[in-house]
Image (cartoon, grey):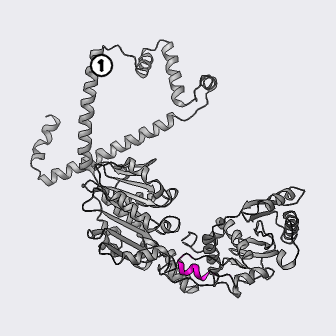
Amino acid sequence: MANYDNIKDANSKRTPSERQEIARIAGKASGKARRRKAKMRETMERLLTMQAEIPGLSDVLRTDGGESTYEELISMAMIEQAMQGNVKAYNAIKDTVGQTNKSEVDLEEQQAKIQYMQAQAEKVQKQEMADQSVEMKDPHDVIIPEFWELLDDTEHEHQIVTSGRAGTKSSYSGILGISTIVSDEPAAVVVLRKRHNKLRKTVYKEMIRAIGRLGLDKNDFDIGVSPMEIRHKRTGNVIYFSGSDSIDDTKGIIDESKPIRLVILDELTEFFDVGEGEEELTNIEATFVRGNDTGFRMVYLYNPPKNPNAPVNVWCKKMELRPDAIHKHVDYRDVPVNWIGKKLIESAELLKETDFKLYRWVWLGECIGVDDLIYYMFNKNHRKEPEATHYKLIGIGVDYGQQNATTFQAGGLNINKGRLEGLDEYYHSGRDTGKQKSPSDYARDFIEFTDMLHEKYSCSIFYAYIDPSAAGLAEEIKRLAVQGLHYNIAIKPAENDVALGIQRVQKCFTYNAVTVSENQENLIRELGTYEYDPKSIEAGKEKPMKVDDHCVDGWRYLIMGLWTKIKYFLPAGESEDE
């Protein structure tokens, strides 16, 4: 009996659900085989374009403008075989370069057949994709229960989600975005950050993770980087990623047949800190709401700033009064431990013990207010003499002033103790002493300072992080640094992001990742007096008082410069910036 005759009776006796299950299994196996072949093709294409070195042939290819790839070398070998009378090699070359013995009529007929076969293949492929599609997990199963209400909410156009650290709001946005584009309803999603260069490592990566969390296969999506977008192959629905400064570019590539159903604004605070705030959000809404009578929503994600008067916090309070807006706040305690890990919980509990007020802001996301004293966590326990007798690397933060004070703040990395140890300082105020110094004078003083540190701590590498406005001093130090010293000095411009720098210094004091020597008496004095301007706190954008701040600025330059090393002294989860 023929093969089909052996099974047709058995197949006809199966129930529809049994036949459907068999077809599903077969379709899944077919898809797996097809994906394996596709991966093999990708591998082969990559290998063929790799460069190879064959004596004699490679030089000939490069002389003629080639690159000596495997593809070129194989072609050369085929030509040699054809020259020796190999007919198959000759025919293969003819096919490659497009030569044929067929008539134009034959070619037209063949082209028509190819087009028909392609159309049939596309039709079958779409059906296969529908048959093989992996069943998506229920989105409710992969987000915390506190977000279920938002996920199902169709009444509120504006959904504001705030949290402390590890509140999983980004995970929620990823699940929401992917579940939107896999639905059969035509839809597009736009994901925005204020800065375009932050997209790829944050929300873009979160959306890709959401594919796996929902139990879906990445091969069912076209995941592009340029332009940055994720398209579901079966539905054609897509997620676009953009910075708010390039919205016009994004509008130009949007498929008008896929209405915008969802706009996600990540790190909303940035839109207020470096953007136009509420006005900018209104313009974004007006840009994407067009053509949507129903089913449109905007989701805003951010960690609340400490200051209740911060513009984004004021905006949120205003939005809470609107009938079309809802605000949901969560924190890490709402998340299952196995989702975020015990290490993260331990980090939260450690901060809870050491600085409960800071814990409330960092982990609970509460607006705790801003203390006038910036480094209120600095205390006598931080005042310690360095324990190491030798340092491989010493960093020096340099703050320069012509009439104001100039200071060098030195610290050594003690890897064994896991901290930056303050060593010594240089301090000179032209105003206080009545004696002005030139950049060349300060450069000589700097070399004397490093000579002393080199002799005392046997250190041969110094990193100097110099006030960005002190280019003249930097050049003078460079000039002297090459004149027969027994150690190396690397001059680096200081990173002068004041808010970020203060945040990092606060972390270092909170977790005892730094100590200050009694030799740094001017730094100790300033740490006890450095305050925010009360008027700036009331305005919602706190700024330090520009009084007696030279040593703390130099210390901030030092910690910012060595941050890539210091951050490993902090507990798990604390190395990231808020």
Check disc 1: other Cα within 10 Å, few if <14, some if 14-19, many if 20+.
few
| Residue 481 screen position, x and y as percent | 85, 58
Residue 531, placed above or below residue 575: below
Identify the residue shown where x is 15% and y is 54%: 17
Left or right for 220, reference 339: left
Q: Please identify the residue farthest to the bottom as the structure is shown.
A: 380
Which quadrant holds the N terminus?
top left
Instruction: Say which of 507 and 346 sits in front.
Output: 507
- Is there any visible trace of residue 499 in the rendered image? yes
The x and y percentages for residue 213 are 37, 62
Kind of element beneath mark 1: helix
Q: Is residue 38 left or right of residue 107?
A: right
Question: For residue 547, what is the image quadrant?
Answer: bottom right
Viewer-nearest residue: 404 or 261: 404
In the rendering, at what x and y percent does residue 85 appear?
47, 11
The residue closer to the viewer here, 250 or 220, is 250
Check the image and name the residue furthest to the right: 484
Q: Quadrant of the C terminus?
A: bottom right
The part of the chain drawn in magenta is: 530-541
* Left or right position of 122 against 499: left
Q: Residue 538 magenta-drawn?
A: yes
Q: Which residue is mark 1?
A: 107
Type of amino acid under label 1: Leu
Question: For the point 87% across and 62% down, which residue is it?
Answer: 440
Above or below 545: residue 228: above
Residue 546: % across, % down:
69, 76
Residue occupying the point 52% across, 75% down: 343
**Which quadrant of the structure image shows residue 444?**
bottom right
Going 53% across and 83% down the picture, which residue do you hit? 369
Quadrant of res 350: bottom right
**Residue 215 in sight in this render:** no
